Image (tube, rainbow, N blue to C red):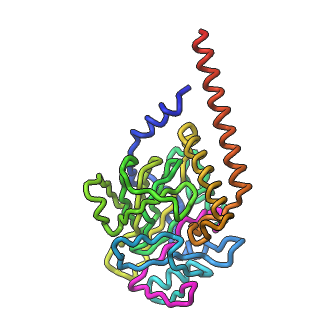
Amino acid sequence: MESYTDVRSKIAYLEPFVMSGCINDWKATAWTYQRLAEIVKPAERDEFLRIRLGPKEHLRGKIIFENESKMAYLSSLEQFFKWFNGEATLMTDDHKIVDRADHWGYFDYNYVFDIMDPENISDINWRHLGLDADPADSTIWIGTPGAHTPCHYDSYGYNVHAQLSGSKRWILFEPNENMKPVRIPYEESTVFSSLDVIGADSSLQGKKIRMVTLRRGDVIFVPPGWWHCVQCVSVNENEKDLNNISVSVNTWIPLVDYDRIPRLQEAAVSTMVAILIRSGLITSKQICLSESLGCYDDSLCDFEKLLKEMKNKFCSLNSALNRKKDL
């Protein structure tokens, strides 16, 4: 039985890689924008689909985190697509019209089990890649050119991201790079960087940058701990062509032996955030919208459960080592 240190040292040598043309048999790659508008519906608990908005002209040094973004709430993706090609208007939650010429929109980080029926979810087939992953656990990302996710790393799990249509630029940094991590805004298992990667922050000078552009049919594999900033980019110069909208899905593959301590750490952070919320030291505005405000009792219960599992794991490991010594 390997120790956690041994497992962690092996994970540290893993690097991101891309496979091309390996999902051409997926039914999901045949999803048209008309089809997406038909099969994506608001979750039962919601009445609308949330679109995150941002300016195409990036102000250097200003990172647009989810909790600071303007939002639009739509009844269907058809409205979003019509806004993109100039056939409809879009209004923010504070009742301001959004000009498509100088704004991007992102329907991001949505679990498909919330917004699709099972028969459509099955069009995603991770097992075709040899991955034991339930397609219902996938998230879908639909963005216009310029839409992006701020630089961050995933605390645990192997991120597998498949490009169904359109294109995305991935900018990656090794886990040991000092990207000035922050936990506010808070999102479970996501550690954001306070460096403006999109705006080419001067602090990035001298850092080793990896960059790759995914196109239809490409899949990128990103090990835990790798910093990444992801931006939707155009495939042609026609500003109203729906083919310039990026559509992708991803899942996180558990790394059981590696994930134990990061999951315990995340449970501890979640508990601390719940305490800070309860005490009024932080507010809902400092929490990403993809997160609930957090229940202290639930967070503490999760932490205690993971801590107990960790103790049992180490006890089993010590017993195995002692038996080996006796032999």
Q: Which residue is rendered at x = 37% and y = 70% of the image?
A: 233
Q: Position of residue 313 (x, y in %)?
A: 64, 32
Within the image, what quadrant is residue 180 found in? bottom left
Q: Is residue 188 left or right of residue 150?
A: right
Q: Is residue 283 left or right of residue 98?
A: right
> Looking at the image, is 104 positioned above or below residue 230?
below
Q: Which residue is rendered at x = 61% and y = 61% of the image?
A: 121
**Which residue is more in the foreground, 293 or 89?**
293
Q: Position of residue 101 (x, y in %)?
A: 39, 86
Q: Which residue is rendered at x = 35% and y = 79% of the image?
A: 57
**Residue 104 in magenta?**
yes
> Looking at the image, is 117 positioned above or below residue 227?
below
Q: Which residue is rendered at x = 50% and y = 48% of the image?
A: 158
Q: Position of residue 298 (x, y in %)?
A: 72, 55
Q: Position of residue 96 (x, y in %)?
A: 52, 90
Which stretch is magenta? 92-115
**Residue 200 in magenta?**
no
Count of numbered badges drawn on the protein = 0
Q: Residue furthest top?
A: 327
**Which residue is more in the foreground, 163 or 73?**
73
- Residue 301 visible, this angle: yes
Instruction: Quadrant for the N terminus, please.
Output: top right
**Which residue is more in the foreground, 10 or 214?**
10
